[in-house]
Amino acid sequence: MFRVQDTILSDDIATARFACDLAKCKGACCVVGDAGAPVGDDELSHLKQAFELLKEELHPEARKTVERQGIVQQSKHGLELSCCDNEECIFVTYEDDVAYCAIQKAFLEGRIEWEKPISCHLYPIRLKKVGETEYANFEYINKLCSAACKKGEKEDIYLSEFLKEPLVRRYGKDWYDEFEEKCKEMRIENSKAAIL
């Protein structure tokens, strides 16, 4: 583990190579799992606005799910996005056989000013707050992440670099600069240890 300001991060965030490969994973992180993406109280108004804007574009099952249980639901871990049959996120939309986030698509088209929940933007990094300290872990799930890890290896892209935009969004540029410097130091240390 290493620390950047008030955040403690798992070492693999600095050392893993990762680059999403939608052609291979088909957007599985939006459709596979037993719970919805974590969301914060400060994101609820954005989610409501997004649902009102996009509901006619979403799958009918997503609209029925929201009628039954709302856009978010409370779990023992906190607030989570609702999912259809506990799998597909209510905001999933498809282009051919690839799942995309309807919120992010609308953001990229300039129809909404908020990109998507920060937990989705940061995935596969997951955050957990304990007191004033935030913990960040690389949540590696083979069937979701293996293609991205292979692509990251092939293209020599580190997870910390691939997630620069959401990390800056979450923590700010000064934090990210300090974080990336520590990541580089850890990679050098790992290279030296591998030689010995």
Image (cartoon, rainbow, N blue to C red):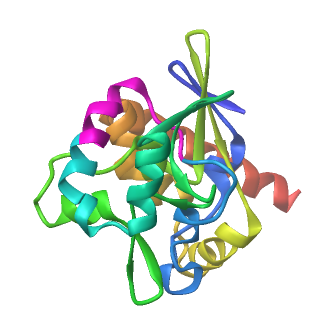
The x, y position of residue 167, in whole percent, is 41, 42
Q: Residue drawn 69% across and 39% down?
A: 10
Queried whether the magenta region covers residue 44, the answer comes back as yes
Residue 93 picture quarter: bottom left
Q: Is residue 194 left or right of residue 130?
A: right
Which secondary structure class fits the magenta region best?
helix
* Residue extending farthest top: 131
The x, y position of residue 27, in whole percent, is 51, 72
The x, y position of residue 191, in whole percent, is 73, 57
Looking at this view, is 119 or 96 the one in front?
Answer: 96
The x, y position of residue 138, in whole percent, is 66, 48
Q: Residue drawn 61% across and 48% down?
A: 14
Q: Residue drawn 33% across and 66% down?
A: 58
Count of number-bearing discs: 0
Position above or below: 52 against 111: above
Q: Residue drawn 52% across and 63% down?
A: 30
Residue interval drawn in magenta: 37-48
Residue 171 picture quarter: top left
Assign the N terminus to one quadrant of the image. Answer: top right
Position above or below: 5 against 124: above
Q: Is residue 161 left or right of residue 125?
A: left
* Residue extending farthest left: 110
* Residue extending farthest bottom: 96
Position above or below: 149 against 193: below
Q: Is residue 57 left or right of residue 194?
A: left
Looking at this view, is 65 or 25 the one in front?
Answer: 65
Queried whether the magenta region covers residue 124, the answer comes back as no
Assign the C terminus to one quadrant of the image. Answer: bottom right
